[in-house]
Image: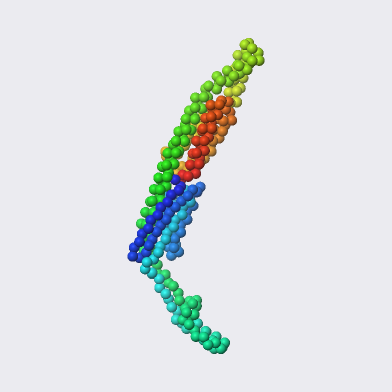
Amino acid sequence: MTSMTGYGYKELSNDKAVISVEIKSVNSRFLDLSVNLPAFLNPVESYFRNLVSEKVSRGKVDVNIRVRELKSSSTVNVDSELAFSYAKAFEKIKKECGLTENISLDLLAKQDGVLTLINNYDVESYKEMIEPVFKDSLEMFLNDRKREGENLLKDFEEKFAVLVSCAHFFTEYQPKMEAQFKELITSKFKEIVGENVDENKILSETAAMMVKYTINEEIVRFKSHLEAVRKELSQNPAPGKRLDFICQEMNREINTIGSKNQNADVGKMVITAKDALENIREQAKNIE
């Protein structure tokens, strides 16, 4: 079991650049992956995106790749002809307007196209530098999710054990229902007609109550859902969405048992089951 929340960070410095990779995630119904990196690395974004999506199936994941150059690979291009054209234009304006100010180098340098910054990034070289840092950060991130998932699994197992206990209680109670109903009906008849009670009438009324209040079918389905949960926990590495659905179905059976209940002890156990199930449903929203 893996949690949807996790964090990983790794940084590397060499004589060319300082590189850092941060990966963090929170809960999300589906995989919502965002990769933020310098614009010049856009050609390799899909590569790093795939490294994450191969390992993660759910969660809102934010990946931040930062690169700070220590040795600039940029150059400045000077368009002398364009600068000369600007200078001639300014001289003409100066003459025609009768101005005396000198044309400064700063003024010419600010004109569009005179100076152009050219970035000579070797994208493949940067990718090779980033890759080991990225993979280390990703491993930390995945281990963090796994560690949190192990803690969630312990809580799952505790709450699941409570549900199994409740199912056992309901199963043990079911055969006792007929005897309890028969005793109750017999008592009511004796209050009305005395000791001369028609046994067939008692059996008929008992059967009618059993049809109305029996919880056998609900118990069978409840146990079936428990087995489905057990299978998901043991076999599915990302059971979150499936568990949420099963819990909804299980909640329906518990509610029906509660609505048919005619016994105080059963009522208490229904409350216990609903509390344990609600905890499982909440935790299912935190796992992958």
Please report the residue visible at 33 percent of the width from the left and 65 percent of the height from the top: 15
Q: Residue 34: x percent and y percent?
A: 47, 56
Residue 251: in sight, yes or no? yes
Q: Which residue is at 53% across, 21% downward?
A: 176
- Up the image or down, 145 lies above or below 121; here it is above
- What's the image's color scheme? rainbow
Residue placed furthest toward the top:
196
Front-most of 93 and 208?
93
Q: Quadrant of residue 117?
A: bottom left
Q: Where is residue 125 in the image (x, y as percent from the top left)?
A: 36, 63
In the orientation shown, which residue stands out farthest toward the right? 192
Can you give x and y, in whole percent of width and height, for residue 172 in the image?
Answer: 49, 24
77 or 286, which lies in front? 286
Q: Residue at x 60, y 14 (%)?
A: 199
Seen from the viewer's position, the closer of residues 271 and 203 is 271
In this picture, is 256 found above or below 202? Answer: below
Tell me how many marks there are: 0
Pinpoint residue 283: horizontal percent, then vertical percent.
48, 42
Q: Can residue 246 be seen?
A: no
User: Which quarter of the rendering shows the N terminus?
Assistant: top left
Drawn side of residue 210 relative to residue 141, left or right: right
Indicate whether 232 appears above or below 213. Answer: below
Q: Which residue lies furthest to the front in this view?
A: 101
Residue positioned 52% across, 22% down in the render? 175
